[in-house]
Amino acid sequence: MQPPIEKAPITLTNLAESANEKLEAAVIEATHRAFNLGCFVGLAPAAIFASITFIVVGFSVISAAIAIVLAFIGLIAFANLAAMITRRNTMRQKYFREILPEIELTLRRQGYTSEEFEAAARQILPPTAMLAAFLPQHPDNPPPDGEPL
């Protein structure tokens, strides 16, 4: 019988990178799903709009083509709106429900503080990383819109 394998201590940079990867993977998947659903849901109204335009204008192919282009633009706008809202909500929910508790548990187990993790995460992650949006602002870097901390 083999002795139990000790889990190697995780570094703060590995923790920050893995948490960011989990967050990004979940958000990307949900965003793609919302965009595809937005496109699919909008197809029937777009087809109805184009058909009604074709009939009302007197069976004009040009007006139907214009209606199809307008419907397509509206469809893409609706799908982008659905994807944007889903991205924001999924990012927030995933972070507070899964990522933050995992980070806190790992920090406690490894004996690190949240300040050490935040400093390591700020160093390793680019400012555009999804996890970086949830890190407290560093005193040297005030918020971009000039609001107080």
Image (cartoon, rainbow, N blue to C red):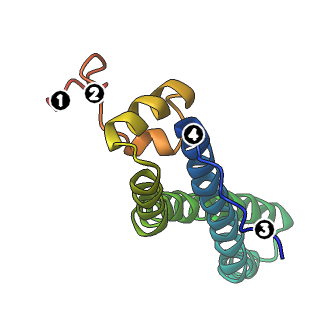
Label whose residue precedes the other's in the sequence (1 or 4):
4
Task: Place residue 51 in its image quadrant.
Answer: bottom right
> Label 4, label 3: how many angstroms apart (C-alpha)?
60 Å
Q: Are marks 4 and 3 in contact (CB under 8 Å)?
A: no
The disc labelled 4 sits on which kind of residue? Thr
Q: Which residue is mark 4?
A: 11
Q: Do the residues under discs 2 and 3 have CB atoms within 8 angstroms?
A: no
Question: Can you name the residue that lies furthest to the left here?
Answer: 148
| SS category of the residue bearing label 1 | loop
On-image quarter of the C terminus: top left
Residue that numbered label 2 is attached to: 143
Q: Earlier in the sequence, mark 1 or mark 3?
A: 3
- Do the numbered discs 1 and 2 sit on residues whose CB atoms are within 8 Å? yes
Q: Which residue is mark 1?
A: 147
Local crowd at mark 1 within 10 Å, few (<14), some, or many (≥20)? few
Q: Amino acid at mark 3?
A: Ala
- Residue at coordinates 34% horizontally, 42% vertically from top-left? 113
Q: Which residue is mark 3?
A: 64
